[in-house]
Amino acid sequence: MVGSALRGAHAYVYLVSKASHISRGHQHQAWGSRPAAAQCATQRAPGSVVELLGKSYPQDDHSNLTRKVLTRVGRNLHNQQHHPLWLIKERVKEHFYKQYVGRFGTPLFSVYDNLSPVVTTWQNFDSLLIPADHPSRKKGDNYYLNRTHMLRAHTSAHQWDLLHTGLDAFLVVGDVYRRDQIDSQHYPIFHQLEAVRLFSKHELFAGIKDGESLQLFEQSSRSAHKQETHTMEAVKLVEFDLKQTLTRLMVHLFGDELEIRWVDCYFPFTHPSFEMEINFHGEWLEVLGCGVMEQQLVNSAGAQDRIGWAFGLGLERLAMILYDIPDIRLFWCEDERFLKQFRVSNINQKVKFQPLSKYPAVINDISFWLPSENYTENDFYDLVRTIGGDLVEKVDLIDKFVHPKTHKTSHCYRITYRHMERTLSQREVRHIHQALQEAAVQLLGVEGRF
């Protein structure tokens, strides 16, 4: 095993180096701008470590960070002034600061937008009551530094810690990381905004007739409408406050004519839970998830006398809808034609994105027999992102075939290459595609059909 791990590491370095001369002239960030971080990516030789944000993390059999992802950590697009994600964040912050004021005239909600994206698996999963066998923990869906540390998959990873410090109203904004498919809507790094608000008995029932006789908690049975420890009166008031808060926020962002609907759903850390959908240009779009916080989570963080709500939304999702941005890769580009459109004097100024010229695509297929075990599609997508970088617009699985005699499975993927700023040549793409073919064979154990 030691020998194969070393061979895999060396093969990866060789294959990436082989393709890198192409990307250097492209002005895209396929290999990143920080060689020191990139050099240690994906190499899992015994005793190796990942250096990330000034700390060292020993690697093990769970480590699966790629060079592509490492070059993105620390970019913090949501904190770059006049970036479209920064604009959305600032508009939400301003709304909460103005709408919700504490007893002494200070903002009710604290804002945390610079927390480290490296968290423990306990923070990301266990603190949120996500079961040990829940599919969201899979190595194939997350970026692990090792078995105990990972890049957060959601900003909810900070909920428990902030509640434990005694906070009862806060916003968390940050970059989150998930292994996913490749298309115009998905990217391995995106940005979330999370909010939590807790209520004491006095705060929740203030102004309610005979409110002093009402209670937050009881011992009953769980139903579709409430948890076993909550009274129906308390849940309905928390749910009402949550939906009113979110309706005001969306109207602030999209305008008074916005049509909204609520859909019941499931999250491990809230109950009841809802998704908000908005009718935008005649199409119903899901924009966020929310719900009444699981009391077990609240209690474990030391706030046993309070009940609360939480919601989370994706900044890219909102920005793509609000500004009509067609491709998620644009958020990472440094094309002045894109960035200058969001340099506005007032953050609430309307921005209508003017599309950049769309350069022609180059389309290549790749097909191979899958190994008998340990293959996941997300492994292939990560490899494509690492070799091809942001030149890859999308990857589609166009054919799946099982051989009747050998019972081997074959996959054929169609890869669309398109540069955001210029026309790609067939020769350039051929070099990248060949490097991808070689890497797939050596690193994923597939048998090429090319």
Image (spheres, grey):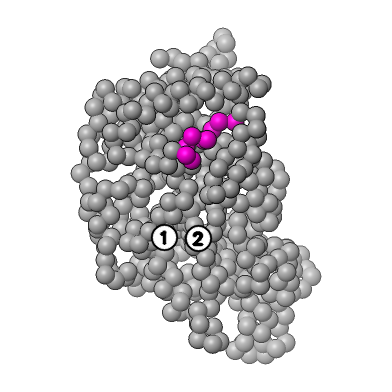
**Within the magenta stretch, is there residue 393?**
no
> Badge 1 is on which residue?
79
Is 347 drawn above or below residue 32 in the view shown?
A: below
Q: What residue type is disc 1 on?
A: Asn
Query: Which residue lies at the image location 61% right of the left edge and 51% below the top edge?
Result: 119
Give the residues drawn in magenta, as a range.
36-44
> Badge 2 is on which residue?
114
Is 151 drawn above or below residue 84 in the view shown?
A: above
Tell me the crowding category of disc 2: few under 14, some 14 to 19, or many 20 or more residues within 10 angstroms, Cα based: some
Q: Do callouts 1 and 2 mark residues in contact (Cβ within 8 Å)? A: yes
Query: Which residue lies at the image location 63% right of the left edge and 90% below the top edge?
Result: 209
Relative depth, front residue between 44 and 203: 44
Left/right placement of residue 246 relative to residue 355 reads right
Query: Which residue lies at the image location 47% right of the left edge and 51% below the top edge?
Result: 74
Q: Is residue 224 visible?
A: yes
Left/right placement of residue 440 relative to residue 121 reads left
Instruction: Measure how far apart labels 1 and 2 are at the Cα level.
Output: 8 Å
Q: Is residue 153 visible?
A: no
Residue 132 x, y percent position in the rendering: 71, 45
Indicate the secondary structure of the residue bearing disc 2: loop
Relative depth, front residue between 274 and 66: 66
